Amino acid sequence: QVQLVESGGGLVQAGASLRLSCAASGRTFSNPAMGWFRHASGTEREFVASISRNGVTTFYTDSVKGRFTISRDNAKNTVYLQMNSLKPEDTAVYYCAARAVIATATTRTYEYDYWGQGTQVTVSS
């Protein structure tokens, strides 16, 4: 089993920045591909960003490109999501996720096997 713990959420004004962290522990293996997803009230959980095992390849949903950056520190088993120029529509619970198999990063929710409890991000206008 892999445990994922997110931190760094909060309440900020539009235009501000936040950095989310996701610390992995437990039976980790060879730095799995990781992703960030979000769930806003009244919507389905959606893909935000993902990163390959070595951190070289990243994917972003169109609405965050140029504003969010995903990165990882494999020595610390931690993945980050730097969020700049936040907008009210970014308000959601943000979850990190890890793949159980040794595979590439993807954008599909169902391909991630381990999930954190989520951290709330609220952006006021």
Image (cartoon, helix red, strand yellow):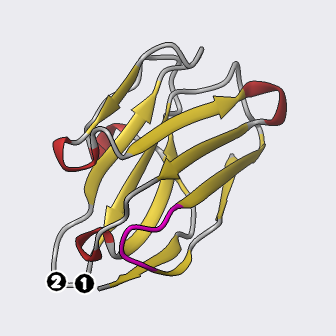
| Rendered residue at 64%/66% (across/down) | 8
Numbered badge on residue 42: 2
Residue type at mark 1 is Ser
Q: Which mark is residue 41?
A: 1
Specify the segment rendered in magenta.
13-17
Tell me whether the residue at label 2 lies in contact with that at label 1, contact meaning CB atoms closer than 8 angstroms: yes
**Residue 117 vertical position relative to residue 81 in the rendered view, above or below:** below
Residue occupying the far front of the picture:
15
**Left or right: 112 as drawn, with respect to 116:** left
Task: Please identify the dominant SS of the magenta region.
Answer: loop
**Residue found at x 40% / y 45%:** 68
Residue drawn 35% across and 63% down? 38
Q: Position of residue 56 (x, y in %)?
A: 51, 13
Apparent side of residue 125 relative to residue 70 in the rendered image (left or right): left
Q: Position of residue 26 (x, y in %)?
A: 79, 45
User: What's the amino acid at mark 2?
Assistant: Gly
- The residue sitting at 53% across, 17% down in the picture is 102
State which quadrant residue 86 falls in: bottom left
